[in-house]
Image: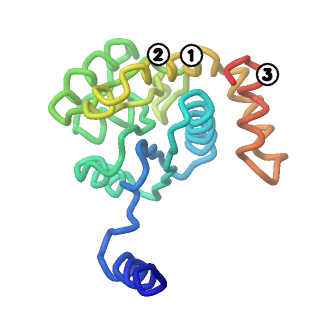
């Protein structure tokens, strides 16, 4: 038995990508920002607590790395905002955030990714244009876990500007950001 465990351990260390982020049923990615961390930690905890699924959390320094992970099907859910999404596709950002969202919904279908209900908070880009931030989920995950959009939608409705500010303060004060996310989810009766 010892030999078997040693051989498996050596193989896992030797095989490239054997311990990659695809070992989890659901992998969530976002940019490595405070807002990205808040949303991913909250969403991961919600999914784990309500479904029992193990969630992998992945942060990226540059968008190209996250796009590559999506293209390689290593991420099932990402956090994206409409202004950034349009700019990365070399598209003009319009004045109507809802129309921007509809445009992106159509464009992302070719990537086998679908925009879910946006979070209730709004941000503004450097030009002052309002952006919506939303989870984007893969077609594969939708077929495997059809209840996820509804579950994530419950969180999206609760995270408005005030709640986001509350979460930011909780994350900045806490030595353990997942605890701040847990406290928020409990206060909103989500877990």
Q: Which mark is residue 154?
A: 1
User: What separation in Å lies between label 2 and label 1 (alpha carbons)?
Assistant: 7 Å
Residue drawn at (47%, 20%), measured in percent from left and top? 118
Q: If you read the primary sequence from the N terminus, does the residue marked by circle 3 or circle 1 appear first? A: 1
- The picture places residue 6, in percent across and down from the top left corner, at 44, 85
Q: For mark 3, does the 10 Å Cα neighbourhood hold few (<14), some (14 to 19), or many (20 or more) residues?
A: few
- Residue wearing tag 3: 187
Quadrant position of the C terminus in the picture: top right
> Looking at the image, which is closer to me, 144 or 44?
144
User: What separation in Å lies between label 3 and label 1 (alpha carbons)?
Assistant: 13 Å
Question: Which residue is at the far front?
Answer: 1
Q: Is residue 127 left or right of residue 182?
A: left
Q: Which mark is residue 150?
A: 2
- The picture places residue 95, in percent across and down from the top left corner, at 38, 16
Quarter of the figure with residue 65? bottom left
Say above or below: 73 vs 100: below
Residue drawn at (15%, 32%), measured in percent from left and top? 110
- How many tags in the picture? 3
- The picture places residue 56, in percent across and down from the top left corner, at 49, 50
């Amino acid at each position: 038995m010892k030999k078997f465990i040693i051989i498996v351990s050596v193989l896992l260390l030797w095989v490239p990508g054997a311990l990659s982020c695809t070992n989890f049923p659901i992998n969530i990615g976002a940019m490595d920002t405070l807002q990205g961390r808040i949303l991913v930690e909250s969403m991961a905890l919600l999914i784990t607590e309500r479904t029992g699924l193990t969630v992998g959390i992945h942060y990226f320094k540059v968008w190209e790395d996250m796009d590559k992970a999506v293209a390689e099907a290593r991420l099932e859910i990402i956090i994206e905002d409409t202004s950034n999404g349009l700019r990365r596709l070399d598209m003009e950002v319009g004045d109507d955030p809802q129309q921007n969202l509809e445009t992106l919904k159509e464009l992302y279908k070719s990537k086998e990714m679908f925009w879910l209900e946006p979070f209730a908070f709004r941000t503004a880009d450097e030009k002052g244009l309002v952006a919506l931030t939303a989870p984007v989920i893969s077609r594969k995950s939708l077929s495997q876990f059809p209840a996820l959009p509804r579950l994530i939608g419950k969180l999206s409705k609760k995270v408005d500007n005030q709640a986001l500010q509350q979460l930011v303060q909780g994350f900045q004060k806490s030595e353990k950001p997942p605890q701040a996310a847990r406290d928020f989810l409990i206060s909103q009766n989500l877990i």
